[in-house]
Amino acid sequence: MYGNGHELIIEDDVKIKKGTIWFENNNCRISIGKKTTIEGAHLAAAEDNMVLTIDDDCMLSQGIYIATTDSHSIISLDSKKRLNKAANVFIGKHVWIGRNVTINKGVFVGDNSVIAGGSIVTKEVPQNVVVAGVPAKVVKTEITWERKRL
């Protein structure tokens, strides 16, 4: 943890087996909603005032990487301005994130969706879909999922 004013919110009945919670800069927040399970994840909120939210009843496998930043700056040679600014990440309710998934800054994942193992998510994921691939794309629509095998 680097900086000041950070907030970590872990709601009721959350289970985290292993992972890293990373704060950098100032006034960042990481929030994990109730009944969420995490097998192994690196959750990073970095750069001032960034927020990483995982809503209720999510299931994260192992090798998950979610961050609000690229960590280092990419600078335009023409304008001399930074091109890759940080952005908040929001994971909706009842989202299943498969093994070895990366979710990049600025991503919004809709409720009841599934992110297939090995995917890299670079843009918004609608609700009730399965996304897969590098970069992740919608491969199924109108779905939901259950923790137990039926």
Image (cartoon, grey):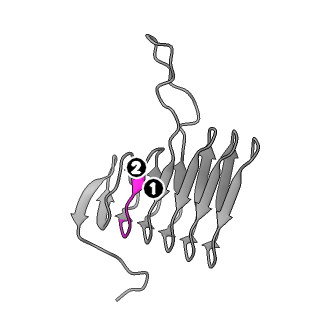
- Residue 101 bears which disc, if any? 1
Count of marks, rendered view: 2
Residue type for callout 1:
Val
* Residue under the image location 60 percent in, 61 percent down: 31
Q: Residue furthest bottom?
A: 150
Crowd tier of the residue under label 1, counting other residues whose Cα lies within 10 Å: few below 14, some 14–19, many 20 or above: many
Left or right: residue 8 versus residue 106 is right
Q: Is residue 27 above or below residue 7?
A: above
The front one of 8 and 20 is: 8
Residue extent of the magenta highlight: 108-113
CB of mark 2 within 8 Å of CB of mark 1?
Answer: yes
Q: At which x and y percent is residue 103? A: 46, 51
Left or right: residue 112 versus residue 44 is left
Task: Give the image quarter of residue 49.
Answer: top right
Q: At which x and y percent is residue 105? A: 48, 44
The front one of 120 and 26 is: 26
> Where's the C terminus, which quadrant?
bottom left
* Residue under the image location 70 percent in, 55 percent down: 7
* Residue under the image location 57 percent in, 50 percent down: 51
